[in-house]
Amino acid sequence: MEILGLSTSPSSGGAYALILSEVEGNQRLPIIIGSFEAQAIALELENIKPPRPMTHDLLKKFVQNFDSDVKEVYINELKEGTFFAQIILEREDQIIELDSRPSDAIALAVRFGSPIYVDDSVLVEAGIKTEPEQKTIEKALNSDETSPGQKELSQLEKLEAELKTAIETENYEKAAKIRDRISKMKG
C-alpha cells in the first residue's frame, strides 16, 4: 500500500482520515487517526524537519542506535472497528515483531522508507473499491421495476454508486460511512 493522503472535516472532532491505496489494485483503506499522528506523517511526507525531533523521529534514532531497521509494517487485523498493526524490525539476522497502532507504524514506515502491507481480510472488511463495475452503477440509476428482493439490491447498487462518487470527490469520511452501510446490508 502507499499513502494516498490525509483528510479532515470539521465534524470529525480533530481526527484525520489516513487514506492508503493499493500500489497495484483498486482498493483504498481509510483509517481514522489522531491529529498528532497525522502531523507526524504529513511532516515527513513533505520533508519538513522541525527544529527539535518529534516522537517518531526519536523512535527512528532509537531503532537505528540499536543497529536495527524497520523492514515493513503490516496492518494485520480489524477488531470491533479498531485497526491493529505490527512493526517488523530486523537486527542482524533476527526479526522482531512489535504490536503497534497503524498510525505509529506508518509514521515510522515513512521515516525508514519501509513498505506498508495490509492483510487481505482487513481490505475485505474495511477497504473501498475505487472502480465499481459500470454496469452495476447504470443498473442502479436506471432501475424502474423492482420486486422486494430487487429493491434491496437496487439500494445496494445505489449505495455503491454513492460510494464511488464520495471517493472520486475525496470525501473519505462519507465514503467510510457508506462502506459501513454496504457491509451491514451484505452481512
Image (spheres, grey):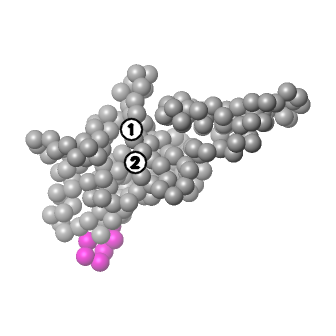
Residue 174 is a magenta residue: no
Residue 95 is a magenta residue: yes
Residue plotted at (51% across, 46% down): 28
Give the Cα distance between marks 1 and 2: 8 Å
Q: Report the side of 75 relative to 136 (left or right).
A: left
Question: In this picture, is 57 found above or below 90?
Answer: above
> Residue 82: which disc?
none
> Residue 6: which disc?
1
Residue plotted at (88% across, 29% down): 145
Residue 127: x and y in percent read 55, 46
Question: Quarter of the image holding residue 19?
Answer: top left
Residue plotted at (30% across, 53% down): 110
Quadrant (top left, top right, bottom left, bottom right) of the C terminus: top right
Instruction: Give SS at disc 2.
Output: strand
Residue to which mark 2 is pinned: 3
Q: Report the side of 16 relative to 47 (left or right).
A: right
What amino acid type should be assigned to the residue bearing mark 1? Leu
Identify the residue at the far top of this view: 10
Quadrant (top left, top right, bottom left, bottom right) of the N terminus: bottom left
Q: Is residue 101 visible?
A: no
- Category of crowding for the residue at label 2, using alpha-carbon neighbours closer than 10 angstroms: few (below 14), some (14–19), many (at least 20): some
Is 17 in front, or is 49? 49
Is 106 in front, or is 23? 23
Q: Which residues are magenta?
A: 91-96
Residue 102: x and y in percent read 39, 48
What amino acid type should be assigned to the residue bearing mark 2? Ile
Residue plotted at (27% across, 58% down): 112
Is 62 in front, or is 16? 16
